Image: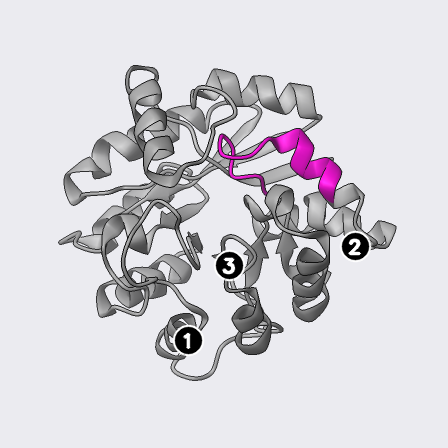
Amino acid sequence: MIIDFHTHVFPGKIAEPTINFLSSKSGYIPFGNGTHHDLIALMDKGGIDKSVVLPVVTKPTQFASVNRFAAELNNSERLWCFGGIHPEDETPEVHLDEIKKMGLYGIKLHPDYQNAFIDDEKYIRIIRYALSIGLAVITHAGVDDGCDGEVKCTPDRFLRVMDKVFSGNPPDDTRLILAHAGGFKMYSEVIEKLSGLPLYFDLAYVAQYTEPETVMSVIHAHGADRILFASDSPWADPGTCAEKIRQLPLTAEEQEKILSGNALSLLGK
């Protein structure tokens, strides 16, 4: 079984302009048109069984529409969906409860798109409450090639998040996930400062476009028990990403955990 833990889709009417806009900002060439039909076609082609869809709320007024769309997608047999929330949300606890009642599995944060640093107290409030009601929390981490300015989720900042959320005493395991191998293009810092902590790294985009030696260094430092296979579709090809993982010098047990076992455990499947 293969579970892609990091994908993006958009409603049909806005999919093409959204993909074109994001492509122009980042320089990335998309695989597909950004609709859920196209994602499933890519999954079929690449042998992917399930995909986790991660929406991003870029302004507070989008909360209802973004999460309604996520809840609709969550009815698909092939897709498991997270919700989204903005740090400027005036009633985050109320909205997080709504996300939970919708049957969504967690929330996606994107500090660069949401223009806030991940260790901002508004994020801390959201993360702490989301975890308390059983929602997983995934955040973009490291560089975003489509955004200018200071990186808003660095390893140092996420260490502060861990300290604030857990009052300096984190549990042995958490439902916190850092995308892009813990910090896109910041792998040395990730290994030095975050490896071994009770949180997960996904391999979105990294699986296809980063040197295998770098990917393996992150896996070995952090431990295969807390690594999640991910593509970042439509910005990478799910099937190619899966093949890249199969080519790594992993044991059969490590490969199984990364490709599906860790995701199933994290999502309570």
Between 140 and 49, the residue placed more toward the observer is: 140
Residue 149, percent across and down?
27, 59
Q: Is residue 260 left or right of residue 104?
A: right
Task: Look at the image and give the residue range highlighted in magenta.
Answer: 230-244
Residue type pointed to by label 2? Glu
Whether the magenta-drawn stretch holds residue 235 is answered as yes
Residue type at the position of mark 3: Lys
Q: Nearer the viewer, mark 2 or mark 1?
A: 1
Looking at the picture, does residue 193 appear above or below residue 227?
below
Q: What is the C-alpha distance between the residues marked 2 and 1? A: 28 Å
Label 2 to label 3, Cα distance in Å? 24 Å
How many numbered marks appear?
3
Q: Which residue is mark 1?
A: 156
Q: Which mark is residue 185?
A: 3
Say which mark, if any, is on residue 67. Answer: none
Q: Which residue occupies 46% across, 44% down?
A: 105
Q: Position of residue 254 (x, y in %)?
A: 79, 54
Disc ID at residue 254: 2
Q: Residues within 10 Å of mark 2 (few under 14, many from 20)?
A: some
Q: Quadrant of residue 201?
A: bottom right
